[in-house]
Amino acid sequence: MSQNRVLYSKGALLRLATDIFAAAGVRAADAELWADILIWANLRGVDSHGVLRIPEYIAHMDDGKLNVGAELKIARQAGAAVTIDADQAPGPIAIAAAMDEAMERARDVQVGWCVVRNMTHAGAIGYFALQAARQGFAGLVMTSSRPLMAYPGARIAAASTNPIAIAVPGGEHPPLFVDMSTSASGMGKISQAKDAGTAIPEGWAVDAAGETTTDPHKAAMLSPAAGPKGAGLSLMIECLTSLFAGFPLIEYALETGSPRFGRPMNGLAIAVDVSAFSDLATFRTLADGLARQLGNLPTVDGVDQVYAPGERGDAVLAKREIEGIPVAEGTVKRLQGIAERFGIQMPAAGA
């Protein structure tokens, strides 16, 4: 155990998350999938999207902002395009279903494009892009949410952190993939800093007056990644998800002065059949070669290894599966409160 951190095994956290979701009324299969996504994020070092989120999700269930009993419905289907109405379902369940639909379309017509409307927070969306890459598709996933991010020249939030993830199959090498927010950081990392009692880096967020801050408790809006580039990409993701779904989030909030009820999000899952463009085995070989060449690049002083997209997280995962997952003490305390509420015993440190 390091300062302000408690180590838990992958299995211990997976059981804890699954048990909490099941006790909260989530269907068994959905609870297992949801827990797996959270622990996957923790294993890869994306702690902002791991078990830290559980208390937030439970609060949204309590407030009626998250519908654990939602029945996903196909609202529209035309060729390669599918629209799913999620009815405020857990985001991970909705996006996993969307990627399944996208891959099914891609098997028939080489590409599948599935939009999801009115879901909730989806977590680390790289998980779903990899869902496609592991089956021989190129996978793209995007999600959109209410205004959370500053927009260049504006005094109030007018964009969101809308992430994008892209994954392609590898051969002997794991799939290459990137999972990035359009903001300089994500809200989860702000929460992570609060739990850990640490400052946030300069440039991550601004306070209510629009001034940059390093105090996570004063962070009122996130800053866009690369300024206008991140802000512009965020709004285009809003177009490809929310506007395609007929369920706008940014425009609605700006016009009415308040977001839609709850914490609704929209999503997009795309699957592309690689073999429609190139022999899949050849593509896998080329992807492996690209990763190998990046790894062979000469390094600058202080850098031991150049990583291909996804490799850094793979390295963290390999280490954490052996050594355990560090969880901030603030997060542990909040999880203890949730566990006690449902009569679940917290795992012992290092278990």
Image (spheres, grey):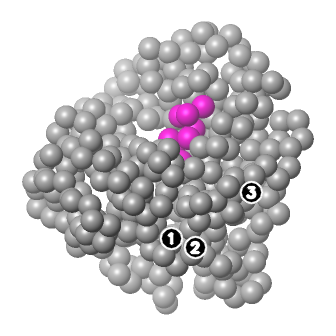
Magenta span: 125-132
Q: Say above or below: 243 vs 146.
A: above
Q: Along the horizontal axis of the image, is 349 left or right of 161? A: left
**Which numbered tag is attached to residue 61?**
1
* Residue 48 appears left or right of 86: left
Estimate the x, y position of residue 100 in percent, counting from the top left. Answer: 66, 36
Q: For mark 3, give the secondary structure.
A: strand
Please state the horizontal and vertical placement of residue 263, each as a whole percent of the image: 59, 72
Q: If you read the primary sequence from the N terminus, does the residue marked by circle 2 or circle 3 appear first?
A: 2
Type of amino acid at the residue the image marks with label 2: Lys
What residue appears at the point 19 percent right and 34 percent down from the top-left corner? 322
Mark 2–mark 1 contact, CB under 8 Å? yes
Instruction: Give 289 or 93, whichever is nearer the viewer.
Output: 93
Confirm whether residue 203 shows in the render. Answer: no
Q: Residues within 10 Å of mark 1 (few under 14, many from 20)?
A: some
The quadrant of the rendering that contains the N terminus is bottom left
CA gap, disc 2 and disc 1: 6 Å
Mark 2 → mark 3, Cα distance in angstroms: 15 Å
The image quarter containing residue 256 is bottom right
Q: Which residue is labeled 3 in the image?
A: 85
Q: Amino acid at mark 1?
A: Met
Q: Total number of numbered labels?
A: 3
Q: Is residue 44 visible?
A: yes
CA–CA distance in space, label 1 to label 3: 18 Å
On residue 65, which mark appears?
2
- Badge 2 marks a residue whose secondary structure is loop
**Nearer to us in this view, 283 or 231:** 283
